[in-house]
Image (cartoon, helix red, strand yellow):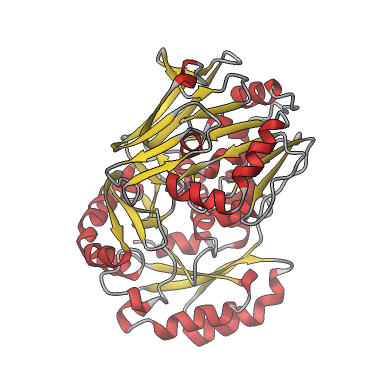
């Protein structure tokens, strides 16, 4: 089990690299994360949903994503509440205090999923969440040491030298762990070193001497990490690419399934920018993307507080293109009705009125791997659906696509505003090229899947070169 000294220390990437390295050594290996908190989810082969990072790790292992790989998923909808997904299925919307009460009951399904993976594979590599140093959360813990002790899984502690203070990160973590948890740690490693790793030899030796834990290496910064799908919206907002065709995605407060944008970031003819709160939509924007959201009505209010509704209206008057995906599609209509409080408090919120449609939230969540045909370009496209709600109205008579012969999505009368529930569209090379060309943009014809596979192989080689993979595998039991 790989645990981190904090959030965003690179655990997900490390696990993906180790999994691909183990697979290339001929091992049957699977990823596992007991509890994840993310609005970036993937639809699984068994009809559920898991965190997007575990889907990437499954790909590194050569496996289809399965709900056992991430049995507890928390999808934040407000600052104090989140949707609880257990073994792929939506269970409830819980306030933080209520989740603390429910959490101890979740160890049973967590261990159930873990045991199935353990029995089916040579190796399971587990990813922790946050940090075990958050000892105030130790009671009922299922994400870090609570799981490691219950399942008797050895822990490797990863520190992030890029953010500074890595010696204190690791030594301090050891200091706050109790004896039982401390004994579960089999060693440490250092991640994200920039420059010559030998320059940290003295610091590395100090950590080993002070903690008594063996070290498994110092991993230099992996420069191609941006080519892999991002799980954290913070990672996405740091990305900005250059190209003649200018695409701006609105950085919503509850942005969800933003991996839709990753393939666009690799198009040399596209300039992709994530608009931050308080920023104004540039007047030279060609395409505005309204992404998915875990709280459609809440993000409509957020959008208006930034003045982006005014910016979008001006963009439309200038003849710009608009694409709404999933929650973004719902926002483009006249109203979003949630009479039963499915996504929060019950009520109705006015939409942007850029599409002649209305949305009603429904208790049933649609989770589906979907094959469709984009009508404007007559191009087949693969994607997935993961949403609550039904959208209807006059503009659905001009569908964005068809799915098994039925219409999907909507397009405005002038063709400039488009909405669809289909995620993952731009990962499809043929659709991405056809769609960009339809809008007058240059398409590279690049193979996105091949890029991801090549990057995973390069990551595995990077891990093999700089970490003691033999020692890490020997630590497993």
Above-or-below relation of 370 to 56? above
Above-or-below relation of 16 to 439? below
Q: Which of 231 and 112 lies nearest the eye of the viewer?
A: 231
The image shows residue 335 at horizontal and vertical percentages of 43, 36
**Is any atom of residue 174 visible in this view?**
yes
The image shows residue 413 at horizontal and vertical percentages of 58, 19
Q: Report whether 5 appears left or right of 89.
A: right
Q: Which of 347 and 435 lies nearest the eye of the viewer?
A: 347
The residue that appears at 68% across and 30% down in the rendered structure is: 446
The image shows residue 56 at horizontal and vertical percentages of 49, 44
The residue that appears at 70% across and 66% down in the rendered structure is: 194
The residue that appears at 66% across and 78% down in the rendered structure is: 201
Q: Which of 132 and 103 lies nearest the eye of the viewer?
A: 103
Q: Outermost residue toward the right?
A: 244
Location of residue 164 (image quadrant): bottom right
Q: Quadrant of the N terminus?
A: bottom left
Q: Report whether 293 appears left or right of 120.
A: right
């Amino acid at each position: 089990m790989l645990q981190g000294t904090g959030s965003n220390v690179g655990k997900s990437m490390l696990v993906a690299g180790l999994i691909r390295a183990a697979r290339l050594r001929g091992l049957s290996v699977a990823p596992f994360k007991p509890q994840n908190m993310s609005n970036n989810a993937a639809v699984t082969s068994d009809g559920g949903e898991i965190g997007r990072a575990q889907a990437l790790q499954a790909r590194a292992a050569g496996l289809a994503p399965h709900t056992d790989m991430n049995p507890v998923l928390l999808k934040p909808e407000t600052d104090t509440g989140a949707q609880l997904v257990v073994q792929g299925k939506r269970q409830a919307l819980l306030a933080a205090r209520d989740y603390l009460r429910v959490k101890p009951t979740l160890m049973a399904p967590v261990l159930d999923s873990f045991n199935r993976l353990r029995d089916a594979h040579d190796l399971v590599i587990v990813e922790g969440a946050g940090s075990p140093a958050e000892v105030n959360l130790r009671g009922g813990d299922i994400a870090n040491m609570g799981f490691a002790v219950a399942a008797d899984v050895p822990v490797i502690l990863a520190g992030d030298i890029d953010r500074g203070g890595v010696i204190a990160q690791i030594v301090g973590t050891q200091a706050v762990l109790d004896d039982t948890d401390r004994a579960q740690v089999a060693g440490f490693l250092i991640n994200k070193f920039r420059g010559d790793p030998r320059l940290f030899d003295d610091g590395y030796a100090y950590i080993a001497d002070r903690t008594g834990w063996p070290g498994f290496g110092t991993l230099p910064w992996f420069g191609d990490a941006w080519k892999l799908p991002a799980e954290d919206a913070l990672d996405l907002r740091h990305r900005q690419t250059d190209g003649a065709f200018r695409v701006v995605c609105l950085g919503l407060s509850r942005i969800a399934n933003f991996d839709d944008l990753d393939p666009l970031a690799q198009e040399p003819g596209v300039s992709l920018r994530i608009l931050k709160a308080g920023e104004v939509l540039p007047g030279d924007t060609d395409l505005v993307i309204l992404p998915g959201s875990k709280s459609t009505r809440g993000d409509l209010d957020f959008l208006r507080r930034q003045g982006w509704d005014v910016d979008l209206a001006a963009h439309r008057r200038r003849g710009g293109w608009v694409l709404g995906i999933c929650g973004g599609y719902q926002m483009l209509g006249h109203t979003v009705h949630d009479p039963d409080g499915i996504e929060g408090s019950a009520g109705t919120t006015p939409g942007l009125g850029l599409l002649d449609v209305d949305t009603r939230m429904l208790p049933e969540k649609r989770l589906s791997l979907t094959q469709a045909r984009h009508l404007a370009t007559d191009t087949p496209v693969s994607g997935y659906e993961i949403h609550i709600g039904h959208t209807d109205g006059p503009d659905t008579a001009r569908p964005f696509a068809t799915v098994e012969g039925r219409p999907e999505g909507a397009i405005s009368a002038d063709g400039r505003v488009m909405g669809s529930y289909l995620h993952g569209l731009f990962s499809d090379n043929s659709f991405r090229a056809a769609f960009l060309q339809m809008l007058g943009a240059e398409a590279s014809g690049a193979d996105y899947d091949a890029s991801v596979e090549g990057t995973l192989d390069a990551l595995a080689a990077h891990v093999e070169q700089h970490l003691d993979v033999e020692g890490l595998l020997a630590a497993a039991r």
